[in-house]
Amino acid sequence: MATFVDPVADAAEAYEGLRGLAHATRAFEDPVDMYRVLGEVSGSVRLLRQVLDQLSRAHADHRDIAFTDDRAPAEAVALAAADELHQAADGLDEVADRVMRAHEASGRIAWHTHTSSEPERSRRWVNVVFLQGSEADEVLDLIDVEGVQAGIAHLAQWDFGDETTGAAFMNGEVYHELPRGQWDRSFEADGYVLTYNPQMGYVGLVREHPDTTPTPDEEEVIAARDAFSGVTSESPRRAAEGTDWFAPTSAHGASSSVGQSL
């Protein structure tokens, strides 16, 4: 555990931590974890640069009390060590920048972790929010700068639990297959799936609904909706296979997701 006051003990602690990390990163069971690991590594590289700078300054500051076992001028040796450490710290600037860019790029990747040998359980999703045009620009910029996790955290503010679920059932925005187009990017985390398309200028968030069987309350909502719309539960939904979630069939459909979520 870090002491924050004993550089020798904390250096040993840091070494043990890196040794453990080197061992743990030989394989990743879930590639999603790489994004979080890269975030910690990125911060560690920048802290290491600070450590090297401080070691360089300490060698220079204490050169007047330096001694060597040979005939080399001790002060010059201390300054040489300080110079090497300073150059090493400068060299880490490029490393830190590259790791940071790798972290940002990793955050834009969706990892499909299900394999064909594992039977995938039945799942369904309720719409939380869908933004397009100027409303989506802020979120798309956030994803580009801070990654998809930040995008999910931002859009999750539109999730009001049972109220959002009820609105999704009422509007027919419950999906057994994730609504996304051919060129969309998607990322799943914490029970949500973020789907976005920077070229088309839209972003959406759905939440996994735990049951495959509607609850009594949900059945009432479905019945009320179907009675109002004059369709049966077997009628085609907008979420039917081959239908694009992000291509509403009417002006009302284009705005209902956001309005109900807000």
Image: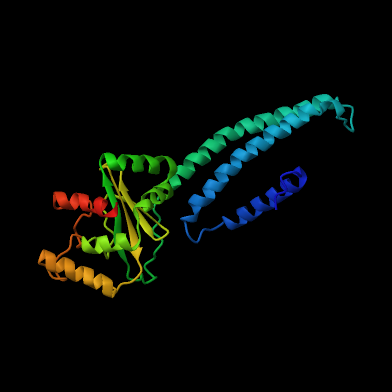
Where does the image place residue 111, in percent across and percent down from the top left? 40, 55
Task: State left or right for residue 222 relative to residue 39.
Answer: left
Residue plotted at (35% across, 61% down): 161
Image quarter for residue 211? bottom left
Examine the image and state in which quarter residue 127 appears: bottom left
The foreground one among 15 and 235 is 235
Q: Is residue 6 visible?
A: yes
Q: Residue at x 50, y 52 (%)?
A: 34
Applied colour scheme: rainbow
Relative to 141, 90 lies left or right: right
Residue 181 seen: no
Q: Residue at x 64, y 50 (%)?
A: 18
Residue 93 in the image: state x and y as whole percent: 57, 33
- Residue at image coords 37%, 39%: 141
- Seen in the picture, residue 242 relative to 185 is either above or below; the reply is below
Where is residue 58? Give x, y as percent. Answer: 76, 31
User: Total label count?
Assistant: 0
Residue 81 image point, x, y percent: 75, 30
Q: Quadrant of residue 166?
A: bottom left
